[in-house]
Image (cartoon, rainbow, N blue to C red):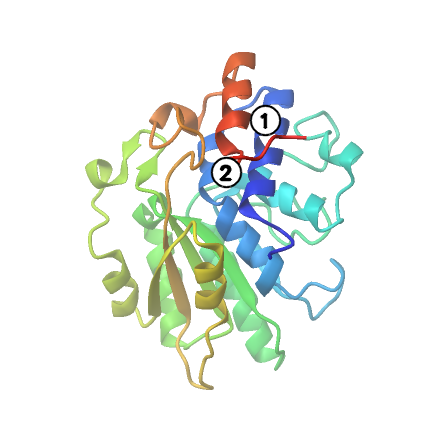
């Protein structure tokens, strides 16, 4: 059994977003299983200051609460520090900031994370390192021209040190991605830019981990894992509801959300 589960991350997302009375809940729930797979099975981070550790770039920075939850479950953030989320002076902002150990790039300006991750992968190549770079993006970020400039560069240089996960939940701040700018054949687009694409169920933690860890040959291409997800996954009144891109919960909604995420037959402690 995974030591970090999507369920455990969801509980923390709901508890902390309710305590701080902030939104961006749906997007954090969307990536909970992806973050769990990365931090439970994939990332090699013996210490946040280790020069040869894997790099993780949360390009969709507004999902930071899922990231903080994983750090807490790994023992890298204590409960007291976790509960400073969004407080004045806290290292836990709405988006990841470099004041938090292990965060190499402040993110949240959408469409920029892939460029940073590509630069980090090129640095590893030039330093003949063996560590890797993982970037987590949203499908809506693929609307940005900067994404494709970075994708083309990484494909041209066959930066196989780089792996991207696209949280493909089909929603963005102002509507469905298919209505704002079509996302059809997104895997094929990445392939056309010189990438290897793998499609998975983004809520199957084992499948996501296996796709991320699948062997690569020496001359392999950079890899993109297209993870199909649901905005607000696990909470009945949030799933695929645009409102929950921004909206905070009231007390009744929080109570219902905590009931919704509990596996059947399990009573919350």
Tell me which label, 2 or 1, sits earlier in the chain: 1
Q: Position of residue 75 (x, y in %)?
A: 76, 49
- Quick check: marks 2 and 1 in contact, CB under 8 Å? yes
- Furthest residue in direction bottom, as rendered: 218
Q: Position of residue 63 (x, y in %)?
A: 52, 39
Left or right: 262 as drawn, with respect to 217: right
Locate the N terminus and report the quarter of the image it occupies: bottom right
Kindly state the secondary structure of the residue where label 1 is placed: helix
As measured in the structure, the alpha-carbon distance from the residue carrying label 2 to the one carrying label 1 is: 10 Å
> For the point 55% across and 42% down, which residue is it?
7
> For the point 20% across and 36% down, which residue is it?
179
Left or right: 59 as drawn, with respect to 99: left
Determine crowd level at label 1: few under 14, some 14-19, many 20+ residues with C-alpha closer than 10 A. many
**Between 220 and 16, the one nearer to me in the picture:** 16
**Between 54 and 234, the one nearer to me in the picture:** 234
Which quadrant of the view contains residue 21?
top right
In this rendering, the answer to whether 217 lies above or below 14 is below
Instruction: Name the mark on residue 30.
Output: none
Locate the C terminus and report the quarter of the image it occupies: top right
Residue identified by numbered label 2? 28
Instruction: Name the mark on residue 17.
Output: 1
């Amino acid at each position: 059994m995974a030591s970090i589960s999507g369920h455990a991350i969801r509980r923390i997302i709901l508890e902390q977003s309710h305590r701080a009375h902030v939104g961006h809940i749906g997007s954090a729930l969307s990536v909970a299983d992806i973050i769990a797979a990365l931090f439970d099975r994939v990332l090699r981070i013996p210490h946040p200051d280790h020069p040869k550790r894997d790099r993780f770039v949360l390009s969709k920075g507004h999902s930071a609460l899922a990231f903080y939850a994983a750090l807490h479950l790994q023992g890298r953030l204590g409960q007291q520090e976790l509960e400073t989320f969004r407080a004045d002076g806290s290292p836990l902002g709405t988006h990841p900031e470099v004041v938090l150990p292990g965060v190499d790039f402040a993110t949240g300006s959408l469409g920029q994370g892939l460029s940073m991750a590509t630069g980090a992968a090129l640095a590893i190549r030039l330093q003949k390192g063996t560590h890797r770079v993982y970037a987590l993006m949203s499908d809506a970020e693929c609307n940005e021209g900067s994404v494709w400039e970075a994708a083309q560069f990484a494909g041209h240089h066959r930066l196989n040190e780089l792996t991207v996960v696209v949280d493909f939940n089909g929603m963005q701040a102002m509507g469905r991605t298919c209505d704002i700018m079509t996302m059809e054949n997104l895997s094929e687009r990445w392939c056309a830019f010189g990438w290897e694409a793998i499609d998975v169920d983004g809520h199957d933690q084992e499948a996501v981990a296996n796709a991320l860890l699948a062997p690569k040959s020496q001359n392999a291409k950079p890899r993109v894992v297209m993870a199909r997800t649901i905005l607000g996954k696990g909470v009945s009144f949030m799933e695929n509801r645009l409102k929950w891109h921004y909206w905070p919960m009231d007390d009744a909604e929080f109570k219902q959300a905590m009931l919704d995420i509990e596996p059947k037959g399990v009573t919350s402690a």
